Amino acid sequence: MTQHSRDMSRRRLLFGGAAVGAGVILAGCTSNEQTPTEAQTKAADGNANAEPGKQVTIGFSAPAADHGWIAAITNNAKAQAAAYSDVEFKTVEAGADAAAQRAALSTLISQRPDVIVLLPHDGKELNSFGLEAMQAGIPVINLDRAFPDAKAYRLQIKGDNYGMGVSAATFIVEQLKAKGVSNPVIAEIAGMDELELTQERTKGFNDTLAQHGLKVENRRAARFTADSGQQEASQLLQALPKIDAIWNHDDDQGIGVLAAISQASRNEFFMVGGAGSKKAMEDIQADNTVLKATVTYSPSMASSAISLARLIGQDRGMSDLVELQVPKEIVLASETITKENASNYLKLGF
Amino acid sequence: MSESPPTTTQLPAQSPPVDPAETTEAAEHGAPAASGARLSWWHGDGGEGAKRNLALIGVLLALFAIGAATRSDLYANPDWVWANMLSILKLASVVGVVTVGMTFVIIGGGIDLSVGAIVALAGVWCTTVATQSFGAGGMIFTAIIVGVAVGLVNGVLIAYGRLVPFIATLAMLVAARGLAAEISQKQTQISENSVINGIASNSLLGIPLLVYILAAVVAGGWVLLNRTTFGRRTVAVGGNPEAARLAGIDVKRHTLLLYALSGLCCGIAAIMLTAQATSAQAAMANLYELDAIAAVIIGGTLLSGGRGTIVGSLLGVIIFATITNLFAINGLSTEAQNMVKGGIIVAAVLIQQVQFGTLSQFFRRNRLTTS
């Protein structure tokens, strides 16, 4: 019996020691000392608006999503606020859904910020919050996901999802024409299909292709993640033994799409990406994959939103415009990044 | 994982000296599907299982026929058909490995909702810059240790902390994804390791490495379930924990090991998925818990535990992958695909109920109450 229990305790010691050792090693392995993604800020330059003005408190809220683009939005906003000496930046976690974000925002209102910059989980669901804040005299800047009610925001700044589809289709049509391909096979890998933005992108893509008498042969919807991109792409490649062009809506999921393409040893087509990640721009520049272009949907809009929030808080206009106030709506153009201009855009990659 | 330690040390000291094989056999007879028979490879789990597995193979053949009918142009090319079958198996491989662990947990009377989150955490942990600096070995070691460790935490909470498995693993689902997001800083971490990435792109004798890994895990799981005391105990613990305890099985310890086994499978799956996507991120392996549970159920494993088959679960995963493939090659939408998957789960469970006569009982009872 004693022999037995000694065996047991020795074994426990061994296992315990191994467990602690493994734990220590693993804890060391969480380090991620990468070059941090450079935030896309615009330093105060020589224009009149650069001079410090009245102190402005900006409240900020964006979903805590696990996606590179949203992470870049938050980082950019923070970095741009830090670039101004006259801005105080207050951020509240948006939680997991619209209800949680509304709760978080009501605590933000009670702190009386001068301006609120908000990327809502869902524009429709947070419309009432926008109205409430505007009625309380706090200007609301809606970032990217529009409120249906024009009274619910002072400024709306967003990307152009429809325009992304248009730009991607335009590039594809030009390339196919240049190559002289007749009856091309065009495929599409969309993002999360339940989101309105995905529908808009697809509509822009289809409309533009239709103008040239073309259509999408097969379309799969992934989930903005690399692993889902890989899975959908692998099935898409299976469905279409010969492809001429692919548009993939999102560069993050594009990592997986490119992996699936190289795993299937396919290279008879070219691909256009979406959003404009740094990795995608580097791939386009290196020109050693099927990825030949990407259409932007840049998270730099968060930096611009903070700059404009400051101007609104200080009652100033945009110095290049004649108007004394910031406009009410700004839609970023979706630009096409190719090998030729990638170097200009690299600093905006996320 | 397949630890089936010297059984004498495992029995509680005060229990009378009994032949452990005999006790588990006895406990197992309390379980609904006592087998004892050692027949062909799919009979191992009992005659019921064999019949159901044949039905699942029938479903697969029907799906194949639908594919051949709707895309006869593609199916006319034998090379394409072979490549397509391999692509279905590759698609099934990651969820398949997770499902093997899930099958053990469910047969043992539990459930593991955290598998997708564990895959994500292990994937993210093994692709940090620090881990990648140790090379492929370090990455594999990390993924497996993280998987097993999280599984052990689940097991301790459930077996010794007496938390309901549903609650404990639901909490882990949230927490593990949270930790994964924290470690990755919500970025997609790219795997630069060519050995790891090669797992998904390389083949041996024309068959992808991923398929070999799936086959090895399934074979290991089958042997463990049907040919070892560990497997017998799993069935006994899931069928009737009290009887198992009285028969001298350390039910708590066994439960702990089941969750660790599930964690191990998740660790292996994390490496495979990272290799496929050449990257990892906190949102990866989204809803794999539901895919795995659904496959286990249509494979004929009782959700209440005590009976189940590895082969059935594998067929379940392959059926889902085939449906995905079928919808993709026909260019149909993902929504329609999900509806069909839901229908298949319901149909599978209804068929099970017909087999056990509960459905006819249900109808009889209803008729009695309404008349």
Image: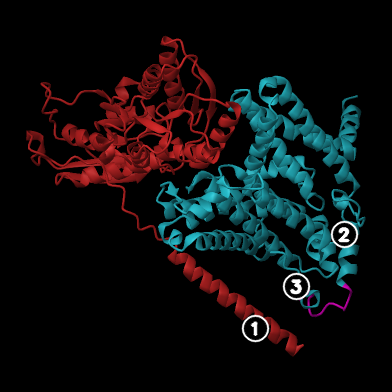
Chain colours: A red, B cyan
**Mark 3, other Cα within 10 Å: few <14 / some 14–19 / many ≥20:** few
Mark 2 — residue? B28
Q: Amino acid at mark 3?
A: Pro
Which-is-in-front pick, marks 2 and 1? Answer: 1
What is the chain letter for disc 1? A
Badge 1 element: helix
Give the number of marks: 3
Picture quadrant where residue B257 is located = bottom right
Relative depth, front residue between A43 and B27: A43
Q: Which residues are magenta?
A: B10-19
- Mark 3 vs mark 1: tell me if same chain: no
At a point 40% along the width and 31% down the height, the residue shown is A273
What residue is shown with label 1?
A10
From mark 2 to mark 1, how far is it between C-alphas?
33 Å
Q: Residues within 10 Å of mark 1 (few under 14, many from 20)?
A: few
Whether residue B258 is situated above or below residue A154 in the rendered picture: below
Q: Position of residue A129 (x, y in %)?
A: 36, 31
Q: CA distance from mark 3 to mark 1?
A: 15 Å
**Is B355 displayed left or right of A139 in the figure?**
right
The answer to whether mark 3 and mark 1 are in CB contact below 8 A is no
Q: Is residue A163 above or below residue A264?
A: above
Residue occupied by mark 3? B5
Mark 2 vs mark 1: tell me if same chain.
no
The numbered dot on residue B71 is none
The amino acid at mark 2 is Glu
Q: Are marks 3 and 2 in contact (CB under 8 Å)?
A: no
Q: How far apart are labels 3 and 2 at the CA level?
A: 20 Å
Name which of mark 3 and mark 2 comes first in the sequence. Answer: 3
